Structure formats: structure tokens, C-alpha cells
Image (cartoon, rainbow, N blue to C red):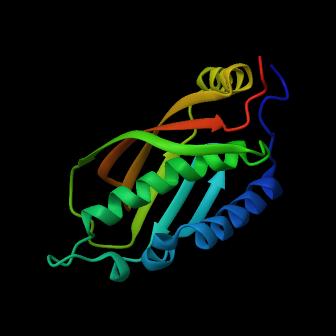
């Protein structure tokens, strides 16, 4: 169904990344403490970064809580970007799982991939019809090209003010 989600060009992606970062800093205090930045947003997904120094543990590696937070923010942020024009829509993470594979010893990088078109289509159709929809997203924590953690999160979008039946 055309028109269910916004189409973005390169300018739209850059502007969306800027709006997301401003939103995160304004409404999620943890983002300021972690010094999260939106490093990229395009047709394939969203990348967030944070410096190691602000997220370090006693072993001089990235704190696990910072890694899961950055991955969660990447999935939540991608959903926010997809629904930015859907005023009155709320997004929550209803379930998540992370698998830590290797320690992170450099800047933290989380990349959330955009799901396949049929999954997105179903998400938007369900949200329009039922005013609530789920979208399972995957994020990867990378150090260079090395996979350090795998995250899966279920984002639930819902509208508080549903039209009466």
C-alpha cells in the first residue's frame, strides 16, 4: 500500500537523523550521560555511537548496560523515525534480548537494520487498522567490522486516543 510510510531522500535522512538526536537529548537523560550521537541514517538502517570513556567499566571495556542501552536506543530510534509523522503514536520496547560475543574496547557503535519491506508493510497496516502494532528489530554492536553483540527488540507502537467503534 503506497503512502503508508514516508519516503526519504538523502536530505530527508540527514534531517531525520538531526531531529532524532535532538529528541533523544531532550527527552531521554541517559542519552546525555552516555554522549550518544546519531552517526547515520539511510535506507538500510540507523547507526548510533557513544564514546568508550563515558561508558567504560572496571575492566576498561564498554559497560554491558551501555551496550544494551545503545542497541535499545537504535531500535527505538529507527521506529521513531519510521513513525515520526504519525502524531499521537507512542513507542515502547516490550521485549529484548542481547547476546554479548566480545568485549568492546573502542567507541560503541550500534547499527539497527531496517526490516524487509513485507514486515514493514504489515506493521503499518496493522497500526492503521488496530492502532497497535509490533515490529521486531535487530541491532548489532560492532567494533570495526567485528560483531561484539547481537540485540533483538520488539517495538510496540500504539495510539492512546483510538477512535471509538
Q: Position of residue 118 (x, y in %)?
A: 63, 20
Residue found 50% across the figure and 73% down from its top: 29
Quadrant location of residue 83? top right
Residue found 73% across the figure and 30% down from its top: 162
Which quarter of the rendered picture does the N terminus lie within?
top right
Q: Position of residue 88 (x, y in %)?
A: 74, 44
**Extreme-front residue of the structure:** 164
Q: Position of residue 15 (x, y in %)?
A: 78, 62
Left or right, 65 with reference to 91: left
Front one among 44 and 4: 4
Determine whether 85 is above or below 68 in the image: above
Left or right, 114 with reference to 57: right
Residue 145 appears in the rendering: no
Q: Position of residue 124 (x, y in %)?
A: 69, 27
Residue found 68% across the figure and 49% down from its top: 81
Residue found 21% across the figure and 76% down from its top: 57
Quadrant location of residue 114? top right
Left or right, 47 with reference to 118: left
Determine whether 32 is above or below 116 in the image: below
Determine whether 7 is above or below 13 in the image: above
Which quarter of the rendered picture does the C terminus lie within?
top right
Left or right, 90 with reference to 97: right
Residue 92 appears in the rendering: yes
**Extreme-bottom residue of the structure:** 53
Amino acid at each position: 500500500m503506497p503512502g503508508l510510510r514516508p519516503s526519504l531522500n538523502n536530505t530527508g535522512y540527514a534531517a531525520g537523523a538531526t531531529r532524532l538526536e535532538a529528541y533523544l537529548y531532550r527527552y531521554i537523560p541517559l542519552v546525555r550521560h552516555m554522549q550518544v550521537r546519531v552517526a547515520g541514517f539511510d535506507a538500510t538502517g540507523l547507526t548510533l555511537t557513544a564514546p568508550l570513556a563515558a561508558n567504560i567499566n572496571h575492566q576498561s571495556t564498554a559497560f554491558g548496560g551501555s551496550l544494551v542501552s545503545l542497541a535499545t536506543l537504535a531500535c527505538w530510534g529507527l521506529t521513531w523515525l519510521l513513525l515520526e509523522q504519525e502524531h499521537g503514536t507512542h513507542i515502547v520496547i516490550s521485549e529484548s534480548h542481547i547476546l554479548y560475543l566480545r568485549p568492546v574496547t573502542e567507541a560503541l557503535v550500534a547499527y539497527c537494520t531496517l526490516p524487509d519491506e513485507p514486515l514493514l508493510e504489515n506493521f503499518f497496516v496493522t497500526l492503521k487498522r488496530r492502532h497497535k502494532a509490533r515490529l521486531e528489530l535487530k541491532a548489532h554492536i560492532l567494533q570495526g567490522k567485528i560483531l561484539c553483540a547481537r540485540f533483538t527488540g520488539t517495538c510496540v507502537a500504539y495510539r492512546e486516543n483510538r477512535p471509538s467503534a
